[in-house]
Image (cartoon, rainbow, N blue to C red):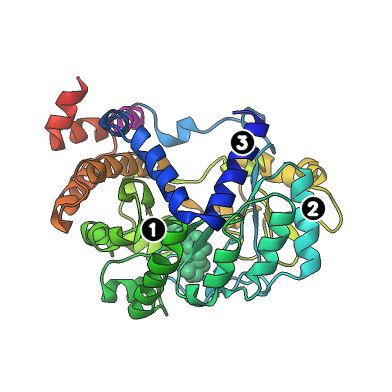
Amino acid sequence: MTNTSQKLRGTTRRALGRHAPWALHMLRDFQVRRKETSTRYFDHVRSAFSLAREIDQTPYLKTRPESYPDLDIGTGKHAILEINNTCNIDCLSCRTSLASRKKGMILDETLTRTLDEYARAGIRSVALHTIGDPFMFPRLGIVFQELRKRGMTSALSTNGLLLYRHVDTLIEYFDVCSSIRFSVDGAEKDTYERIRFGGRWEDLLENLELARTKLTPRGFTINFTMVMSKDNFHEVGKYIELFRRYVRYPQDNFLFSFINSLSPDPRYFDTVNLLESHTNQNKMCEFGSFKTPFTFFDGPVSVCCRDYDGSLVVGDLKENSLDEIRADRLTKKFRQAHESGDLTDYPLCRSCNLPDPRLVEVFRHLMRYFIFDQPKERASHYQEKADLILDAFQEKHEVRNKLESNFPSLAQSLS
Ligand SMILES: C[S@@+](CC[C@H](N)C(=O)[O-])C[C@H]1O[C@@H](n2cnc3c(N)ncnc32)[C@H](O)[C@@H]1O
Ligand code: SF4
């Protein structure tokens, strides 16, 4: 699609969203239905099984590039601007309370300077969080206004508990931000409140109801993301059954992921990680390509969102452009450390452990297919599928075979 037709499409969608949300719904429904043939959804099964073969054949660390020039350096269209690093809760998986960086909210001057530099670098979409919740920021309207001036868009990831403070602003800036991702790590009060420490289940449900009645009818896309662990995996089925009423396309709007070592305190991750035999140190971290710059609320630019202590800062837009930071010795030093494997100077990287991201993809592909195939089933149906997928991940080199024996009819349809 050319730039002009892309812009025209964006303008039409924005105008519809503002003045005739029902027409936007019809357009979206038409587009989804057109793509939503069973062939398309069976492609998810194909992708899952073929990824499983790759996992068996090539260990994750062997898939990592040898050097950063092999990666596409610094040409991304997406960036992060941390408008605040404060949070209203303290999830066990993330523990924002352990961050030693200064806490605070962005000043107008830093906001405009950063967005000007992002615009100059060709960045089109800007996420507004690192560790912290964007709904803690009281002046979201100003941020959206500055994004709108520069023709940029955003999508929010939030625990959702403070949505009620921002509903009107969101409606006003639908053209800038039309998608919200609710991070919810449980389908029962006890589980939710234990993991999302400080959050109240009843508050969550009230805010979700607000999203359903005020935002969905205006064309907002609502997604749910669940970080799966030993603490909540048994609620995957219930999660789908409970939260599907808040989304429009359940097969597309649930984003499952497995817990990683985001929090600086590794104990929770070590206890509840479901994929121990597939967990690796994050060598040749993709953030070293500097494709996605992370600008902190007070100005410094970091290579990583997991920068709880500022030790991965490589520059500051007050002094340098993104291009200069990209070419600077600190960015180079970070890359060289990953390329040589000597991470002595980067304790955060040494303690960054991830389950093989290909397994996350396999899980997502298969669950999308199962939800598409039976969208109105009960929790136990989806739970059974989720359990069988997880079972296939337990052996290090037998993922494909295990999937084939756990899902014989799918395997047969593939042949
Ligand atoms: C750090 S949060 C910040 C944005 C917002 N506060 C929220 O909760 O969505 C961004 C995402 O990271 C996810 N997350 C938190 N801890 C994680 C972990 N240990 N492993 C994987 N994802 C995690 C959250 O569920 C959320 O979807
Ligand atoms: S995951 Fe989000 S909501 Fe939870 S502590 Fe981290 S920043 Fe806050």
Crowd tier of the residue under label 2, counting other residues whose Cα lies within 10 Å: few below 14, some 14–19, many 20 or above: some
Secondary structure, mark 1, is strand
Up the image or down, 18 lies above or below 7; here it is: below
Q: Residue at x 25, y 71 (%)?
A: 188
Q: Magenta segment, which residues?
A: 47-55
Of badges 1 and 3, the one in the foreground is: 3
Q: Amino acid at mark 2?
A: Asp
Q: Is residue 389 left or right of residue 215?
A: left
Q: Which residue is mark 3?
A: 6
Q: Amino acid at mark 1?
A: Phe
Crowd tier of the residue under label 3, counting other residues whose Cα lies within 10 Å: few below 14, some 14–19, many 20 or above: few
Q: Which mark is residue 116?
A: 2
Q: Which mark is residue 224?
A: 1
Snapshot quadrant of residue 413: top left
Of badges 2 and 3, the one in the foreground is: 3
Q: Residue at x 58, y 39 (%)?
A: 9
Q: Amino acid at mark 3?
A: Gln
Q: Tell whether circle 2 marks a residue whose Cβ is less than 8 angstroms from ligand 1.
A: no
Crowd tier of the residue under label 1, counting other residues whose Cα lies within 10 Å: few below 14, some 14–19, many 20 or above: many
Secondary structure, mark 2, is helix
Q: Residue at x 61, y 69 (%)?
A: 85
Mark 2 vs 3, N-terminal side: 3
